[in-house]
């Protein structure tokens, strides 16, 4: 059976990686979320591609809702990597009031923030 998921190397997993991005990263604000990214020479990784970390606080909803949000964001990153900042460590920080209507909504929201609307 073929797996369509992502390798763990494309995910931020350790607290020190999240903290580094929070401290030194640039921020883009969207409706109900913030995209924090740290790229280029500031990135402390031998991996050259983008890595994604997701932060969803308990105020957003119950565990089922938070996990659904994380799954959809990971899938949007996997399918539409071109709309996210390239070669960066990215933290997708969700805030209460995040309007989750689906995968395409996440892609469009990130594309409008990063200026990659024409990318398909």
Image (cartoon, rainbow, N blue to C red):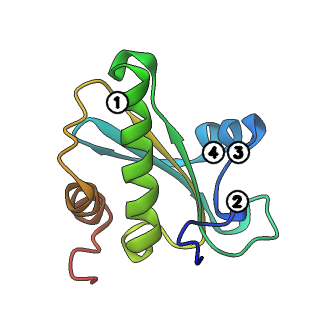
Q: CA distance from mark 2 to mark 3?
A: 8 Å
Q: Earlier in the sequence, mark 2 or mark 3?
A: 2
Q: Residues within 10 Å of mark 2 (few under 14, many from 20)?
A: few
- The reply, left or right, for residue 90 in relation to residue 19 is left
Q: Earlier in the sequence, mark 1 or mark 2?
A: 2
Q: Are marks 1 and 3 in contact (CB under 8 Å)?
A: no
Residue 19, located in which quarter of the rendered image? top right
Q: Are marks 2 and 3 in contact (CB under 8 Å)?
A: yes
Q: CA distance from mark 1 to mark 3?
A: 20 Å
Q: Nearer the viewer, residue 40 or 45?
A: 45
Q: Earlier in the sequence, mark 3 or mark 4?
A: 3
Q: Name the secondary structure under disc 2.
A: helix
Q: Residues within 10 Å of mark 3 (few under 14, many from 20)?
A: some
- Residue pointed to by mark 1: 65
Q: Earlier in the sequence, mark 1 or mark 3?
A: 3
- Residue pointed to by mark 2: 8
- Residue pointed to by mark 4: 21
Q: Name the secondary structure under disc 3.
A: loop
Q: Residue furthest top?
A: 59
- The reply, left or right, for residue 109 in relation to residue 12 is left
Q: Name the secondary structure under disc 4.
A: helix
Residue 13: which numbered mark, if any?
Answer: 3
Q: Nearer the viewer, residue 84 or 73?
A: 73
Residue drawn at x 37%, y 41% is 69
Q: Nearer the viewer, residue 105 or 111?
A: 105
Name the front one of labels 3 and 4.
3
Q: Earlier in the sequence, mark 1 or mark 4?
A: 4
């Amino acid at each position: 059976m073929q797996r369509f998921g992502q390798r763990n190397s494309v995910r931020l997993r350790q607290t020190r990686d999240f903290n580094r991005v929070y401290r030194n990263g640039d921020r883009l604000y969207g409706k109900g979320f913030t995209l924090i990214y740290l790229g280029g020479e500031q990135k402390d990784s031998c991996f050259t591609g983008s890595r994604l970390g997701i932060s969803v606080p308990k105020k957003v909803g119950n565990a089922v809702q938070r996990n659904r949000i994380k799954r959809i964001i990971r899938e949007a990153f996997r399918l539409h990597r071109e709309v996210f900042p390239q070669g960066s460590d990215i933290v997708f920080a969700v805030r209460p009031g995040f309007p989750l209507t689906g995968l395409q909504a996440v892609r469009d929201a990130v594309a409008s923030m990063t200026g990659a609307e024409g990318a398909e």
